[in-house]
Amino acid sequence: MTIRPYQKKDFRFVEDICIAASKYADDDTPLNRAIWCSMYCDYYLDNQPELCFVSVDEEDVPVGYVLGAADMDDYRDRMQDLYLPLVRKVSGGDYFRFVAETKVCERYIRDGYTAHLYLNTAEEHRDAELEAQLLSALENKLKEMFVEGLYIIAGQKDKEKREFLEKYGYEEIDYLTGAVVYGKKLYTED
């Protein structure tokens, strides 16, 4: 497996991985795909592709990704204007949960965790070392941009992901219903 920057040709593969890891994995209809990818995938690929990295197989097909957002003002504005109207129209529950989660996350920004990320790998290709390389690629890019820190939300019951994040320097910074928020400072006051 190789890690490389995201390319436009990867779009559908990244969406496929996103859906496979979602609550819609067993109900991948065009509408469900549009709802979920609007919230957790498409903004990053469309607006901050320089913060998107993929792990690819020997045929250069993505089998995992890390997506990041460093400009939270742009993220919030574009999500509200371009990506969330469809979600609000057809899935009010998903919309209001997502908006509430986004508002809560503003406190992490005030604490210096100014970027956030999503990390997913196709189940048959899950490998901690590969995921660590994806994280490292994003962290290095964020350091080049002088981003102070980043956060990620993991399911409270996802012990494997939580242990993985802790192993790679992420610390628990908050708790949400059914989830733990992990943060990592990229620059410290040493």
Image: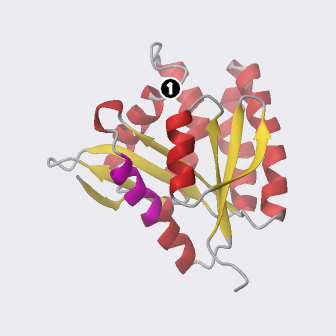
Kind of element beneath mark 1: helix
Answer with left or right where residue 33 lies relative to residue 187.
left
Image-quadrant location for residue 100: top right
- The dominant secondary structure in magenta is helix
Query: Is residue 134 found inside the magenta-colored segment of the image?
Result: yes
Q: How far across and how far down the image is residue 98, in percent? A: 73, 34
Q: Which residue is mark 1?
A: 33
Three-letter code for the amino acid on which mark 1 is drawn: Arg
Q: Quadrant of the C terminus?
A: bottom right
Answer with left or right where residue 152 lies relative to residue 24.
right
The residue most toward the top is 27
The residue most toward the left is 58
Q: Which residues are magenta?
A: 128-136
Q: Residue at x 64, y 73 (%)?
A: 147
Q: Residue at x 54, y 28 (%)?
A: 34
Q: How far across and how far down the image is residue 151, in percent? A: 66, 55
Q: Residue at x 34, y 56 (%)?
A: 7
Answer with left or right where residue 118 lies relative to residue 62.
right
